[in-house]
Amino acid sequence: MPSLNPKRLLQPLRQFAATLFTERLDPRHAAAAIFLGIFIGVAPIYGFQTVAVIALAALFRLNKPLAIGATFVNNPILQPLLIVGGLEFGYFLKSGKFLRISRPHSVADLKSQLGTFVIGSIALGIVLGALGAALTFVILKWRQSDQSPRAKRARFVNALFSGVSNFDRGFVRWKMRLDRIFDFLAAEELGSGPVVDLGCGYGISLGFAAFHNPERRLLGCDLDAHRITAAREALAGMNTELAVCDVRQFEFPQANLIFIFDVLQYLTGPEQLALLQRCASALAPGGKLIFRIPDRGSKTTSRLSVAFDRLIFFLGKNSAGPVVLSADEYQGAFGGAGLQINHRRLRNRLPIAHRVFVVEKPEAA
């Protein structure tokens, strides 16, 4: 007779428990389970709360252990507060003022207070359930986003800049949080091979692109010597070449990825088109040129973008003002080169809008 294996016998039970505890734990359904559990826990159906929450969780296909756990908001420590809260809430809903609690003097008083307690407990359950659900949703969403490709890249870049000055480190951290260009880049295939960033500033985009391949060659230039110094310090352990140089004079080799963010508007129209054509010529087969310009549409955020750019130019004592061409003019810079061009409007977390272009060079036949 074959011997019984306890582990084999317990395997179905373990699988059932794993399914039960991990069922529908996405932020929306987990929040719904918490709301249901708290509401049933506060509702005055003592003795039937567990049965009710299991039945409703099964009906709405919610996580049953999570819903049951939330009913324990009604425990010996909190129960007196929930009872008083139910009475006060109910009396406020009925009369618009809070009740001065006293002993009932008659059966009619007792029935009135009991009815008030039922109404108030239901309302209190809805309020507490909504608060618990909202908190659950926010926490799970935050944890979910913290594991996203964008968050992992951001942690990588922040770690690179951990040794720079407090001001520079803080600037990089807030830039990563507020600028949605990094959301855009996280969703793009950034490939491998050399990366060029024209007007790189602190080199944040270079670090972002090197997340999966720290050995790839990183080249950048900027007119701000302080930022280039900080970028050299942060990216010192990588294959980096950074220069204090005007983008119009910066020489760079064939590259698989080229960035131009918030630079083109400082150049004249012909200079912008000449730089874009030079970048397109330097793209390796399968490479991408990604550049960003301020949006010049009719929406409020677009108008704010125009005003913001003019303020930056004014503070920088640049009398020429920002120069932004039309989308057709930018696309025309690549005419006849066999490139694939896409562009879209990108609204930032700040009330500023941009237009992002992605120019791809097809793979060699």
Image: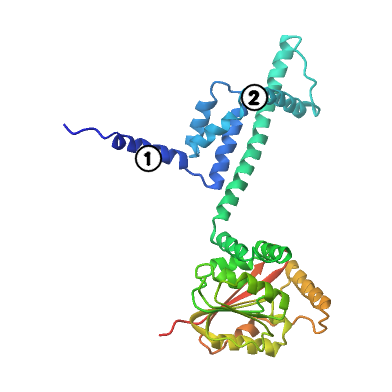
Callout 1 amino acid = Gln
Q: Is residue 119 left or right of residue 153?
A: right
Q: What element does badge 1 sit on?
A: helix
Q: In this view, does 46 lie above or below 348?
A: above
Q: Is residue 146 visible?
A: yes
Residue designated by label 1? 15
Residue drawn at point x = 81 percent, y = 74 percent? 311
Q: Distance between the residues labelled 2 and 1?
A: 35 Å
Q: Is residue 324 visible?
A: no
Q: Nearer the viewer, residue 194 or 320?
A: 194
Callout 2 amino acid = Ile
Q: Which of marks 2 and 1 is nearer the N terminus?
A: 1
Dot label at residue 236: none
Q: How many neighbours does mark 1 have within 10 angstroms: few (below 14), some (14-19), or many (20 or more)?
A: few
Q: In the rendered image, which quarter is residue 356 located in?
A: bottom right
* Residue at the top extreme of this rendering: 106
Q: In the rendered image, which quarter is residue 82 located in?
A: top right
Q: In this view, does 295 lie to the left or right of 15?
A: right
Q: In this view, does 66 lie above or below 270?
A: above
Q: Nearer the viewer, residue 1 or 145?
A: 1
Residue 321 x/y as whole percent: 79, 81
Q: In the rendered image, which quarter is residue 290 located in?
A: bottom right
Residue 1 x/y as whole percent: 16, 31
Residue drawn at point x = 70 percent, y = 87 percent? 269
Residue drawn at point x = 77 percent, y = 75 percent? 309
Residue 65 x/y as whole percent: 49, 35
Q: How many neighbours does mark 2 have within 10 angstroms: few (below 14), some (14-19), or many (20 or more)?
A: few
* Residue at the left extreme of this rendering: 1
Residue designated by label 2? 77
Q: In which quarter of the image is the C terminus?
A: bottom left
